[in-house]
Amino acid sequence: MTFIERLRSLFVRTPVSAVSTPVTVAPAISDVFVPADNQQAYHAAPTVYALEDSLPSWLADEEALRDEGVLFGLADAQTDEKVTEIRAHIDQQAAPIEKMVEQYTQKVEALNQVIHERESRIASLKSQIEALQEQLPIIHDLLRTSVSLLLAIGMSIGNFYLVDETLRPAFPNRWIAVGVFLAGMFNLFGRTSFFYEEGTRLSGRRLIEEVALPMAAALFVLAQAVQMQSIWQAGSLFVFIFFLFLLTGKLLLSTLTRLQNGFQAIRQNRQLLIDKQQNLPVWVTDRERLVREVEAIRNQQWPLVTTLKQLETDLARLNAKRDQLVSLFLSEYQIARSIRDRLPEQRLPEQQREALFN
């Protein structure tokens, strides 16, 4: 239709029926949202229905909107109010959809948060399960340590009787032999000796702490032995007792420490066995339950996401339709205005001009 034909048709205007534009309306949130506690998968898609448009006839039909643009252009009227009216009609239809988009977005984000929490717990349980399954019992030498302890005790007893027999002629009181024996055998300042430790940093202070008392006790026994024995026998006795003091006593203390570590390893192995028998099945069950929950929540979320995308599509379509109608009205307005400036007033009778502008 040419502009002149459109101009003539304005004088005989027929009512134009409003064309309904289908708008998807989503169901209420309560119709599609299932609490996360419900483990049944939600597969049913939400029902949508069409909402009748309430646009005026001049806006529902593009030809009528073109006529409006022509009229405004010929009348040289301001278009701001008309453009605002067009936008208001479309925005009125878009308002409930925008509200639903916001509601569905909040619900989808809430379900995403629940899924994130479940997945974090699943990852934590997976790490605990793998760590417990890969943990091996601690290897200990409790039997060997026990035998070593018995041998150290036997050597200590023999060493005590050797010291006692040597000191008895000069010191009949056995408690003196006990004191010398204890002074030479045990270093109460350390749990172990540097003789039985690897990578130990040896200092002068520690050397004095561990060697001074055994040396003093052995010299004391040597002083008594030279009075009744030959130099060779007394010297041999000194060396033998000194190394017994130095090594056997420290061996006894070190063996006690290893024995303590062995019992601790046995307790840890027992606890590990209990954890694998009791905690591991519970963790596996919890992990499987959380996996099912995540799957159920995703099934609940899918209808929401589908409806949200559909609503966003409808909202974008309405906004595009609004911009299209505004552009159509303004384009017809500009065309009519430019032609009006070129047409002489004599070409239009006064009655027709009044009819156009009224």
Image (cartoon, grey):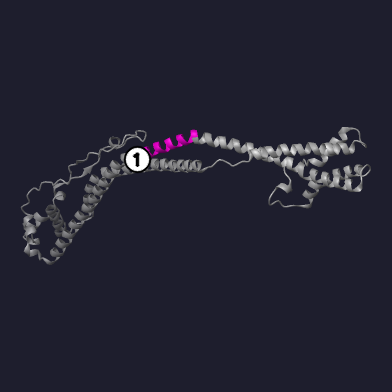
- Nearest the viewer among 167 and 51 is 167
Residue 308 x %, y %: 28, 45
Look at the numbered disc 1 and give the secondary structure of its residue: helix
Q: Position of residue 240 (x, y in %)?
A: 82, 45
Q: Which of 356 and 19 is in front in this view?
A: 19
Q: Is residue 258 left or right of residue 3?
A: right
Q: What stretch is highlighted in magenta?
A: 277-294
Residue situated in front as seen by the camera: 186 or 236:
236
Magenta-span inclusion, residue 70: no
Query: Horizontal and vertical percent for residue 217?
Result: 85, 43
Residue 350 visible in rendering: no
Up-down relation of residue 303 to residue 4 (above or below): above
Q: Principal SS element in the magenta part?
A: helix
Q: How many marks?
A: 1
Residue plotted at (88% across, 39% down): 166
* Residue labelled with disc 1: 295
Q: Residue furthest right?
A: 227
Quick check: 328 left or right of 170? left
Q: State yes or no: residue 288 in magenta.
A: yes
Q: In this view, does 281 lie to the left or right of 89?
A: right
Q: In which quarter of the image is the N terminus?
A: bottom left
Task: Residue 266: give x, y in percent of width and height.
Answer: 60, 36
Left or right: 334, with 134 as reference point? left
Which image quadrant for residue 118? top left
335 above or below 21?
below
Quadrant of residue 153 within the rendered picture: top right
245 in relation to 39, above or below = below
